[in-house]
Image (tube, helix red, strand yellow):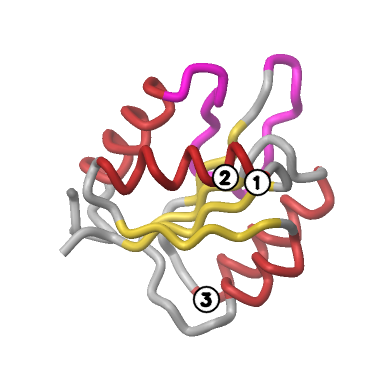
Amino acid sequence: MAILILSVSYDQALLLTRQMMLEAQGYRVVSALGYKDAEKKCTSGNDYGLLVIGHSIPLEDKQALMELFRAKSEAPIVSLLRGGEAVMDGADYHVSPDEPQALVQEIVNIVARDGRNGHAA
């Protein structure tokens, strides 16, 4: 069974594209549009194996989401960063979203090497 990924963005088009690309790799994806939606889905009781926080999320919201997620899970957190953007304390991985195929491959690599979730696609 593939892991469940929580993917968060303020950009609906990017969010849907990311979801489709990850689902094509066999992952189950819950997409959250904005902080409030992410907060609700993060505390829903789902057993997420990975959190992906989009680059469109403001710094304060990224930090709050990481803290909320970390209170419920030890699963990896991936922060998507544009060039020049500050690295987030608390994120396990920092990945550029500029090339969607490379982003998906990096997530596949993270899931494959992360022993905490054990559900590589």
Residue 95 in picture, x, y percent from top left: 52, 28
The label on residue 12 is 1
Seen from the viewer's position, the closer of residues 64 and 10 is 10
The answer to whether residue 46 is above or below residue 84 is below
- Residue nearest the viewer, comparing 83 with 7: 7
Q: Hey, what amino acid is under mark 3? A: Lys
Tell me if label 1 and label 2 are in contact, CB under 8 Å: yes
Residue 75, horizontal then vertical, whole percent: 41, 60
Q: Residue at x 75, y 16 (%)?
A: 84
The quadrant in which the N terminus is found is: bottom left
Dot 2 surroundings within 10 Å: few (below 14), some, or many (20 or more)?
A: some
Locate residue 107 relative to residue 26 in the image: left or right: right
- Percent x, y of residue 47: 38, 74
| C-alpha distance separating marks 1 and 2 | 5 Å
Q: Which residue is drawn at 68% across and 39% down?
A: 88
* Magenta-tinted stretch: 83-100
Q: Quadrant of residue 89?
A: top right
Per the image, label 1 sits on a secondary structure element best described as: helix
* Residue 96 lies in the magenta-colored region: yes
Side of 111 relative to 48 (left or right): left
**Element type where label 2 sits in the image:** helix
Which residue is identified by label 2? 15
Q: Measured from the top left, where is residue 4 in percent x and y?
A: 35, 63
Give whichever of 35, 16 is nearer the camera: 16
List the residue tagged with mark 3.
Answer: 72
Q: Is residue 99 magenta?
A: yes
Q: Which residue lies furthest to the bottom in this view?
A: 45
Kind of residue at badge 2: Leu
Mark 1: amino acid? Gln
